Image (cartoon, grey):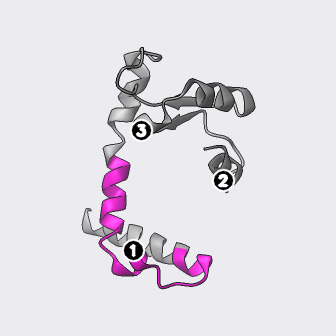
Amino acid sequence: MTATLDARIVADVPLQLIGDKAYDSDRLDQQLMHEYGTEMIAPNRQGRSRTQDGRSLRRYRRRWKIERLFAWLFNFRRLVVRYEYHAENFQALVQLGAVIILLRHL
């Protein structure tokens, strides 16, 4: 997770990160808060005591919108297989796919 935050392309560090149950770890929570000031929002793994109240987990419940976007993007074969060698071309195709999805749903 820290490698992802180090490789970000925006200047600001996010205040909150949303992850699935695999990211439920006290060590990761402390590391993100100490190094970046970022709160990790993840549901508790089975058999683990509650570490978060229900209010922050409301954001986690809305993650399906992002997962749905990725599912729609994976309908474009060129993005799934990644024929493009250069990252700039691949990023342009991802943006083109997002525009096509937006235009279909207007």
**Relative to residue 63, is residue 12 drawn left or right?**
right
Cα distance in 3D space between marks 1 and 3:
23 Å
Overall secondary structure of the magenta stretch?
Answer: helix
User: Which amino acid is tagged 1?
Assistant: Val
Pointer 3: what residue? Answer: 20
Quadrant location of the N terminus? top right
Looking at the image, which residue is at 71% across and 34% down?
A: 36
Q: Are marks 1 and 2 in contact (CB under 8 Å)?
A: no
Pointer 1: what residue? Answer: 80
The image quarter in which residue 69 lies: bottom left
| Of callouts 1 and 3, the N-terminal one | 3
Looking at the image, which residue is at 60% across and 33% down?
A: 15
Cα distance in 3D space between marks 2 and 3:
20 Å
Mark 3: which secondary structure?
loop
Pointer 2: what residue? Answer: 8
| Residue 2 drawn above or below residue 58 | below
The part of the chain drawn in magenta is 65-90
- Nearer-the-camera pick, 72 or 21: 21
Mark 2: which secondary structure?
loop
The image quarter in which residue 12 lies: top right
**Relative to residue 85, is residue 82 drawn left or right?**
left
